[in-house]
Amino acid sequence: MKIKPVHIVVDGPCPNKCPFCISKMNSLNNVLSVDDVNEKDVLKRMMFARQNGFNVLCLTGTGEPLCRDSLATTTNLLLLNNQLKEEMRFNWVEVQTSGACSDGRVVDELMRLKVSVVGISVADPFDDANNAEIMKAPEKNQFELSGLCRSLKGKCITRLIINLTENVFAEKKPSHLLKRAEELGIDQITIRKLLYDRSSDSYHNKWVRENAQCNDIFADWQEFVQENGDPIFICSNGNIAYDINGFTIMLDDPGSRAVPDKAEREIGTLIIRENGRCYTRWDYEGSVLF
């Protein structure tokens, strides 16, 4: 079996102002708003993905998919999937969130809609206050990571997405994160090397260049998983999943895939973007299919 994800981008605002936000770097220009995108068109592309062997549905966003202005769209997309015939339905469904707006009511709604994986994207998994400071989260949207993980435990797979920043991980070793993951009761960990464009002087790119150049830290993680982990599967984007102490751990280096040496012979990822159209790459608008 090949793991082949289709990503649906839920357009909308985000209360956080993360200086490393990859969504801001990859957002499209002059896109339609969520209300302008015909759900039937999105459904058509979801069915196209299923007919071509894609088996994972991942809801992410230009903003926060679980905040009030986006939650209705997220809910409708999940309902669309659940209404598909069984052979066409995505059974592996992931929602990615920064944790903002993820209260008990929202968690219950995700479980009702048969979400199987919740990915929580953070900068500092050890200190909630520092995490909120790095992610520029308004006070009303700050959350307790342990509380959110506790509310999800036993209901779905919980994946912690770590955005490597030097001010957190210069002193924290992989063993520290594994201990913290055990305390949180999560199932999976993704270690993400922050992406930036060397040719751009935008706020996001400048911040990452100055504050999160984690080549050495990421290399330490690569060495750690290769020495201590057992490889269990390879994702369509080439990322290898390892088992370490019962956790599924993946290392994600988006920059290593930014400029391919040659065109892909087999499409491994589909993205239904904010405009409702279907793309094969995050970083190339010319990758639109229809």
Image (cartoon, grey):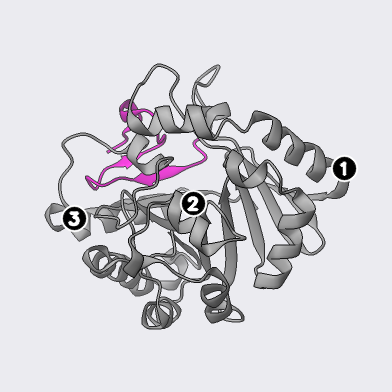
The answer to whether 48 appears left or right of 33 in the picture is right
Whether residue 286 is in magenta: the answer is yes
Measured along the vertical axis of the image, is residue 166 above or below residue 185? Answer: above
Q: Badge 1 local density, few (<14 within 10 Å), some, or many (20+)?
A: few
Q: Is residue 76 visible?
A: yes
Which comes sooner in the sequence, label 3 or label 1? 3
Q: Foreground: 142 or 262?
A: 142
x%, y% of residue 88? 42, 64
Residue ranking furthest to the right? 227
**Quadrant of residue 271 in the image?**
top left
Q: Secondary structure at mark 3?
A: helix
Q: Are marks 3 and 1 in contact (CB under 8 Å)?
A: no
**Mark 3 lies on residue:** 34
Residue 54 got which mark? 2
Q: Amino acid at mark 2?
A: Phe
Q: Residue at x 35, y 65 (%)?
A: 139
Q: Are marks 2 and 1 in contact (CB under 8 Å)?
A: no
Please identify the quadrant where the C terminus is shown: top left
Q: Residue at x 40, y 72 (%)?
A: 102
Q: Nearer the viewer, mark 2 or mark 1?
A: 1
x%, y% of residue 155? 56, 80
Residue ranking furthest to the left? 36
Residue range in magenta is 267-290
Q: Residue at x 34, y 48 (%)?
A: 17
The answer to whether 61 appears left or right of 192 in the picture is left
Q: Examine the residues drawn in magenta and state their main secondary structure.
A: loop
x%, y% of residue 96? 45, 59
**Mark 1 lies on residue:** 227
Q: Badge 2 local density, few (<14 within 10 Å), some, or many (20+)?
A: many
Which comes sooner in the sequence, label 2 or label 1? 2
Q: Foreground: 139 or 89?
A: 139
Give how far apart the Cα atoms at labels 2 and 3 are.
24 Å
